[in-house]
Image: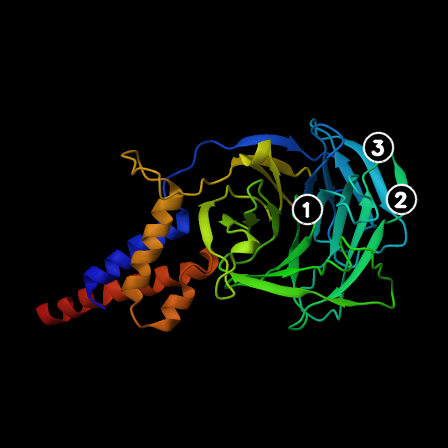
């Protein structure tokens, strides 16, 4: 690699690492004040109570969810009877479809889908009716789904509900991308109930390029919104699968968080609320990246972080050429990309040492 190419590579990697130009100041939506909530791992907007968000702790805590008011206080604590929080990692809200046990009702689904070592033989999703009144209550699940993956255990932290059909999806969490799995309609929203003795295999829908997915949600247009620790991606709707893949339509960097693991779509898909683990955890409000359309005319305005990062990534792939190892690293996240910075810097320094030796 020439010194010029190495310099370009270093510059491009820095762009990828920082996500492009600095973002506008991020607005804080609320701060979770409840001292019991130290590992908030999911967010779901209430369908019945204005400005209330439902959240839950990670593994090792009680099987209960919390309704967080706009001022950050806990408006309700809901215990889910008969469930244990082995590794609760996701929550989503939905309306019960026509052929479900609760048609038209506001529901909340909680996913016991975390599996850091990928060893659990099955995962669970508990579905409850959202309480009509905000109070501390214990509820029975409408249905509990016991599920397996068709290709072996997976770690996952994202549970999504299609707002039109009510179908549930799980997104795996891996370093170099992710996988989308659907819950068979026969168990949800269909009427075939499952219990401890019945386990149903999910269907693999597609692979996606979004890495280290920690939460996700459907957008009103049917596309998916997925977040990692530092990135937000808009993924094409499941109905658009081609060659077993779903296209990334837009992406942007996220503000720094202690351990960003939660996301909820609000304001008709214009904004997302993102949360983090930790005590007194702030929930931030970020604009969802716009998807470019063929009809859109080129803008003379400054490029957005999404366009800069995408262009830089493409140029970086061109520099990588046939080096498949470098191509694999591209787009895999800031933690891995940082390694390229060190490599590029080392390459750039070599010619300088050679010139010093020649002068001697």
Q: Which residue is mark 2?
A: 139
SS at circle 1: loop
203 on left or right of 18: right
The disc, 3 or 1, on the residue closer to the chain's N-terminal end is 1
Which badge, 3 or 2, is on the more N-terminal residue?
A: 3
Question: In the rendered image, which quarter contains the N terminus?
Answer: bottom left
Q: Dot 3 surroundings within 10 Å: few (below 14), some, or many (20 or more)?
A: few
C-alpha separation, residue under disc 3 versus residue under disc 1 = 21 Å
Q: Position of residue 258 (x, y in %)?
A: 59, 46
**Scheme by which the image is coloured:** rainbow
The circle drawn on residue 345 is: none
Q: Image quarter for residue 329?
A: bottom left
* Secondary structure beneath label 3: loop
Residue in the picture at 29% in, 38% down: 298
Q: Nearer the viewer, mark 3 or mark 1?
A: 3
Q: CA distance from mark 3 to mark 2?
A: 12 Å
> Rounded to the nearest whole Å, what is the CA distance between mark 1 and mark 2?
19 Å
The residue carrying mark 3 is 132
Q: Residue 52, relative to residue 187: is it above or below?
A: above
Q: Which residue occupies the extreme front position in the image?
A: 98
Residue placed under numbered mark 1 in the picture: 42
Q: Where 88 sits versus 122, above or below?
A: above
Where residue 93 appears, as percent x and y from the top left, is 72, 42
Q: Residue at x 50, y 49 (%)?
A: 233
Identify the residue at horizontal 62%, vertical 50% (top origin): 215
């Amino acid at each position: 690699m020439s010194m010029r190419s190495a310099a370009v590579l270093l510059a491009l990697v820095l762009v990828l690492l920082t996500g492009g130009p600095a973002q506008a100041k991020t607005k804080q939506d609320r701060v979770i004040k409840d001292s019991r909530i130290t590992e908030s791992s999911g967010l779901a907007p209430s369908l019945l109570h204005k400005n209330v968000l439902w959240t839950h702790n990670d593994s090792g805590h009680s099987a209960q969810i919390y309704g967080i008011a706009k001022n950050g206080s806990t408006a309700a604590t809901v215990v889910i009877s008969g469930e244990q929080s082995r590794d609760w990692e996701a929550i989503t809200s939905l309306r019960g479809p026509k052929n479900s046990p609760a048609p038209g009702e506001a529901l909340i689904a909680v996913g016991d889908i975390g599996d850091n070592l990928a060893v659990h033989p099955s995962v669970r999703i508990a579905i409850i009716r959202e309480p009509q009144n905000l109070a501390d209550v214990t509820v029975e699940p409408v249905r509990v789904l016991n599920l397996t993956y068709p290709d072996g255990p997976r770690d996952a932290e994202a549970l999504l509900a299609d707002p039109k059909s009510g179908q549930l999806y799980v997104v795996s969490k891996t370093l170099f991308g992710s996988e989308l799995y659907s819950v068979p309609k026969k168990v949800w929203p269909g009427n075939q109930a499952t219990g401890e003795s019945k386990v149903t295999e999910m269907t693999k829908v597609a692979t996606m390029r979004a890495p280290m997915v920690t939460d996700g949600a459907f957008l009103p247009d049917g596309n998916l919104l997925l977040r990692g620790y530092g990135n937000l991606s808009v993924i094409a709707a499941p109905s658009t699968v081609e060659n077993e893949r779903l296209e990334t339509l837009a992406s942007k960097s996220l503000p720094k968080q202690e351990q960003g693991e939660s996301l909820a779509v609000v304001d008709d898909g214009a904004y997302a609320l993102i949360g983090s683990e930790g005590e007194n955890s702030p929930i931030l409000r970020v604009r969802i990246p716009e998807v470019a359309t063929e009809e859109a005319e080129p803008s003379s305005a400054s490029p957005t972080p999404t366009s800069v990062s995408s262009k830089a990534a493409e140029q970086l792939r061109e520099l990588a050429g046939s080096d498949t190892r470098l191509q694999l690293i591209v787009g895999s996240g800031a933690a891995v990309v940082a390694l390229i910075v060190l490599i590029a810097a080392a390459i750039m320094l070599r010619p300088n040492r050679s010139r010093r030796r020649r002068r001697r």
